[in-house]
Amino acid sequence: MASRRVNQDLPVIARFEVRHRNYLAPDGSIARPLPAFTSDAKLLIALYRSMVFVRLFDRKAVALQRTGRLGTYAVSLGQEAVSVGIASAMREEDVLLPSYRDNGALLWRGVKPEEILLFWSGDERGNRFSSGPAHDFPFCVPVGSQAPHAAGVAYALKLRKEPRVAVCLFGDGATSKGDVYEAMNFAGVHKLPAVFIATNNQWAISVPLRLQTACETLAQKAIAAGFAGEQVDGSDVVAMHAATEEAIAAARDGEGPRFIEAVTYRLGDHTTSDDASRYRSVDEVQAHWKEEPIARLRAYLVSRKMWSKADEEQLAAECHERVEQAAERYLATAPRRPETMFDHLYAELPEAYASQRRELAGEHDA
Amino acid sequence: MASRRVNQDLPVIARFEVRHRNYLAPDGSIARPLPAFTSDAKLLIALYRSMVFVRLFDRKAVALQRTGRLGTYAVSLGQEAVSVGIASAMREEDVLLPSYRDNGALLWRGVKPEEILLFWSGDERGNRFSSGPAHDFPFCVPVGSQAPHAAGVAYALKLRKEPRVAVCLFGDGATSKGDVYEAMNFAGVHKLPAVFIATNNQWAISVPLRLQTACETLAQKAIAAGFAGEQVDGSDVVAMHAATEEAIAAARDGEGPRFIEAVTYRLGDHTTSDDASRYRSVDEVQAHWKEEPIARLRAYLVSRKMWSKADEEQLAAECHERVEQAAERYLATAPRRPETMFDHLYAELPEAYASQRRELAGEHDA
Amino acid sequence: MPEATLVEAINLALGRAMEEDPDVVVLGEDVGINGGVFRVTAGLQKRFGAERVLDTPLAELLISGLCVGMAAQGLKPVGEIQFMGFIYPCLDQLVNHASRLRNRTQGRLTCPMVLRTPHGAGIRAPEHHSESTEAMLAHIPGLRVVIPSSPARAYGLLLAAIRDPDPVVFLEPTRLYRAAKGEVEDNGESMPLDRAFVMRAGRDITLVSWGAMLKETTAAADTLASDGIAAEVIDLATLKPYDESTLLGSIAKTGRCVIVHEAARTSGFGAEIAADIAERSLPSLLAPVTRVTGYDTVIPMARLEQYYMPSVERIATAARKVCQFS
Amino acid sequence: MPEATLVEAINLALGRAMEEDPDVVVLGEDVGINGGVFRVTAGLQKRFGAERVLDTPLAELLISGLCVGMAAQGLKPVGEIQFMGFIYPCLDQLVNHASRLRNRTQGRLTCPMVLRTPHGAGIRAPEHHSESTEAMLAHIPGLRVVIPSSPARAYGLLLAAIRDPDPVVFLEPTRLYRAAKGEVEDNGESMPLDRAFVMRAGRDITLVSWGAMLKETTAAADTLASDGIAAEVIDLATLKPYDESTLLGSIAKTGRCVIVHEAARTSGFGAEIAADIAERSLPSLLAPVTRVTGYDTVIPMARLEQYYMPSVERIATAARKVCQFS
Ligand SMILES: Cc1ncc(C[n+]2csc(CCOP(=O)(O)OP(=O)(O)O)c2C)c(N)n1
Ligand SMILES: Cc1ncc(C[n+]2csc(CCOP(=O)(O)OP(=O)(O)O)c2C)c(N)n1
Ligand SMILES: [Mg+2]
Ligand SMILES: [Mg+2]
């Protein structure tokens, strides 16, 4: 603790601790005994493939944005293990409440890539999730404001005694918002089936973690909500999957909420509107490239002979193909007619606003 | 911890603890070695007199309310040691940001009792603090919303390098508000000269602490803000004074913020509009009468021969006199003229609203 | 038919809604064993259990955000904000989420929630307890804003609000909670959310108001009647969307209008109505549409609040002036 | 005189204010080394240090509440909210504290703060980044609400806002940040906070608007001119308190008025102006006061936003209709 400590003569009445989880070291070697699920080669390869796809998808999205065919876009470069590790530990019936940087989680959950592009092009139809879990929430842009929703969802699940869990994702910046604190505190009171996960990528746009909080870990934020938090190496997809799986299992079993701090790094700009070189050094970014999740898992897979150069080439081709096709489908999407901006305002458009819709449609009121 | 614990195989990376402070046991005996300031009999007696005055003042206020001469009023019965212990540990130049139940703190700081009554009668002039520290904040009614002000005040003090401290008071209910969390987190980042004190009187109107939070202590809320919290017996004025004094001293010395949980009990109704018998038992209240702060300090003082029955009688008479005179001055206060509701809206009333003021004054625009 | 106060009528509607639909959940500060600080939810926790009638922590943002999450999962949450002065932390959730969840997801997720809160001054309550900022809410697309002025309307409109598939803010005139008494049949019948109520027919002038101010407005109509002026009195009841056709129909008849509300004048909801009339009914207007409102200052605490709120006299005087205009 | 964009003009004003008054402090998300996401505060942290140009944690409620606390201690905080869509968590502090601290304490504590935020749509920004809910703010007694529409006015009005002894919300039209260029003399001269600007004189109709919509409004006036209609164009600039006399004076001359704003129609600030005109200027009105506004729906994301915002054509058409009315 930085400050002079509370009078040390006084008796201690409560103790807390924060633990750290990491299995794969940055070079792909084993840092500590792997969890059982890692014997499932198919799963590990699926995680790998998914992370690679996310990275290519992000790259395509940026290319589209740079050529004027997409709006502002938030890449998850360097953070692929967070999204993929979490989503892969969820059941379909669980409810995801993502932040705007969790493309990887949405893709794993079955949302079509062209819909994600549609969203970032500024089209509400991108949130339809026509092929994903219909109960998942769309990307949340107002930072942290999805946390109370997660608590509400979890309360509903508990009330109905459904064995489902709400999984809420947000960034390190979001942990400074009262929304997140209020939601976690409530989840603690009612032992709700909710897992809150903060992706600590060290930056909230240009604001570094040390200006966000004096806490030495974000995991300790859960102590104020009355439940346990742990810190996970968020660039280790095995750790992310394991931590999420354990937390979800506990929540599903009625043991209440959990909090996970996923420590990782945002290797890219905040969004395509940002220029990160204004506020952080190339050296800092370079250093973090050594820890990034895809090379790490690949090194492990290769060392176990579960992955070859040929596999890699095939995957690259496949991903390229899928991304290009998605982009094409996205670009081929017919635009909405302007008056449809009224079509989902209410279940039924009140007469008071119907004339505005007609005006937009070019039908003039008599 | 109530829930299944985080995987115990993982290494611990951070540890935290909460300590508890109490000097005088409920019967007035010494629970642990007393702090040095208790050798100052004058101070102890001043604390005692002040608590007695607060209790009588509260009683008078309720009597006025019951007879239609005051608005809704919030008594501090049972919590006198919190307000008085805190205020007595502050310097005049420190800044108090009180909640609505901190009459005792305002009175110690020199606010006139008739002004406090004026406020509770529904008259803004009660917040003029004509004789108290002009920089103190008025009672804050929107629960917890004063915490960000405290952080702002403390930031200003630090920026100007003034050796002053902001002291912010709120209830257990308030600790559920994001406002308080956001403010404490910010104070942590900048090591601000601020002391945050939660009066944990077990109830937020009818909501008991266990529905407010799953935390076993409120003191641990500070861990999420990155600084130290301690739990204090809030019915022990010696402990309250000592804890506040230490916290303020640390803050003044540039060591950053502190958090104090003052555990006490609201012996009265929430306000004169409340009927606490609807939600808690007489037995519970009775049990807490055994811990109340005034009898406790009296027992100690009497056991040390610092206080006699005669002193008590004289004090009662004195307090009665002061309270009655204050009530008379309050009742004799001339009412404000209606149009004065515009007089402190802006530094200078814009012409756009001046005609409204004239209308209220009965002067009709041409 | 049995008599009920406004408090009792709302309580009946909540009980009825919870009875008929297990998805209805009531949440807020002190709504459980205490039955709310105004006793509006009295007895509900006993009847429906602490899971469906839920004391939340003291956090208004949370209450509104929980409602959004619950509603998206198909519950029908009815959140209570203890006083309107504490509703502001909910605005982020109301503007950015509740009112647009359906639109954002193109109908995939919806938000059938109700947020109830006491509205207005006049009970000598403490600081910050006398707000009436309905105009802010009425500006939010996707929301409905409802304010009853009688027990029967409170019952019928609240049932409608709870059954409505979209978010509704339900404002309850604090001053009428116990003062308003009237016949209420607990028959489960709702009232339409887009209809104003003509309380009294008249041909000379239209007086339009909502919530507690209907009281003074009606009293002013009485005064005017004794002067030989027949005022039509309209309770707008639903502010968003509001019933233009009833209002404009009335003005087509009377040609004169006074709007009464308790909130500050500038950018109050009276402005919307006056603007609408000015735009659509100019040719039938025989006099300027006049607003009688709270002043553009902070609503004073108890001692001066009665001078802030429109009085019968201010309303009647304004109406006479409008009637004399030519 | 040197040319500056809106961004540069605001930056100049901030620098000037900080230079001349050590109590001025700038705070917000990313205002430091990054200079704000729009570069409005670029260079300030370098010039004035990280204590006076302060990156806050990501918490808007906090930013507004800090401003209140700082201001009560005599600082002059200028808080930045990154986009208007994130201002809602500040409303509690604005309504319950900032706007009434002076009144609550009868002048003992005051709140000389400014809260700046980008305003409005039109830059194809992501969801929730295109809000224009100035009407909510204009309803709050004790607040001032200002919105410049040119670099020179941004400079002069921001200086005035910072020097003003009361809280001011300063809205910056996002769409003009880089698009608007004009001469700005960094001479430390402020402009009055209660004066509207007549951008162009005309006798046939008054067009009144504020912020970015002045652009389309002025373009519409050009179109009308080619039809032989001389439109007077007014930039309201300060919405609260707004300059009635300039506006009503114009209408006394033209008898016709179109109000243009980007926000949703219902309960938008246009309603207040139209209501005021209808109440005070009825006899001089030759046609209904007409509002051309955003629609009463959630502002769409980038792909449809241009259909939501009033176009030159919509404004001109409405104005022609008003001019033809008889
Ligand atoms: C409430 C709110 N305030 C501000 C913003 C603007 N903004 C968008 S992202 C961002 C930083 C978020 O940082 P973090 O939570 O760490 O997530 P990350 O972007 O790093 O994934 C900010 C300030 C916003 N979207 N919402
Ligand atoms: C933001 C807000 N919400 C609700 C209320 C109504 N209210 C007044 S006091 C209170 C309970 C406060 O409890 P606590 O913080 O424990 O303080 P205590 O009254 O016990 O001193 C409530 C809900 C309020 N004043 N402010
Ligand atoms: Mg981050
Ligand atoms: Mg309490």
Image: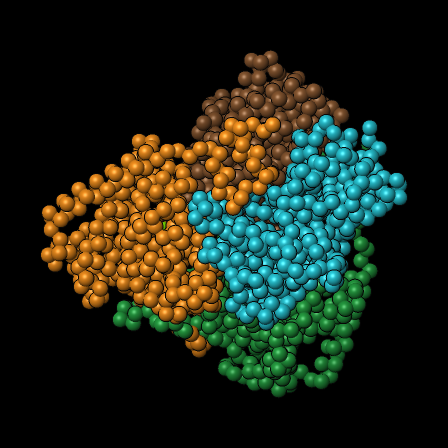
Chain colours: A green, B orange, C brown, D cyan
C142, D38: nearer the viewer: D38
D281 sits left or right of B231 in the view:
right
From the image, which quarter does the C terminus of chain D lie in?
Answer: top right
Q: In the rendering, at what x and y percent does residue C22 appear?
A: 52, 42
Residue positioned 19% across, 43% down in the render:
B318
Numbered circles on residues, count: 0
Residue positioned 64% across, 78% down in the render:
A294
B104 sits left or right of D133 in the view:
left
Q: From what the image shows, is residue B180 above or below residue C281?
A: below
Q: In the rendering, at what x and y percent does residue D67 appear?
A: 51, 56
Q: In the rendering, at what x and y percent does residue A331 appear?
A: 80, 62
Q: In the rendering, at what x and y percent does residue D77 appear?
A: 53, 58
Say if residue D63 shows up in the picture: no
Q: From what the image shows, is residue B16 above or below residue C146?
A: below
Q: From what the image shows, is residue D107 above or below residue D34?
A: above
Residue positioned 36% across, 72% down in the render:
A4
Say if residue D242 shows up in the picture: yes
Q: Quadrant of residue D247?
A: top right
A297 sits left or right of A125 in the view:
left
Residue positioned 70% across, 60% down in the render:
D185
B201, C132: nearer the viewer: C132
From the image, which quarter does the N terminus of chain D lie in?
Answer: bottom right
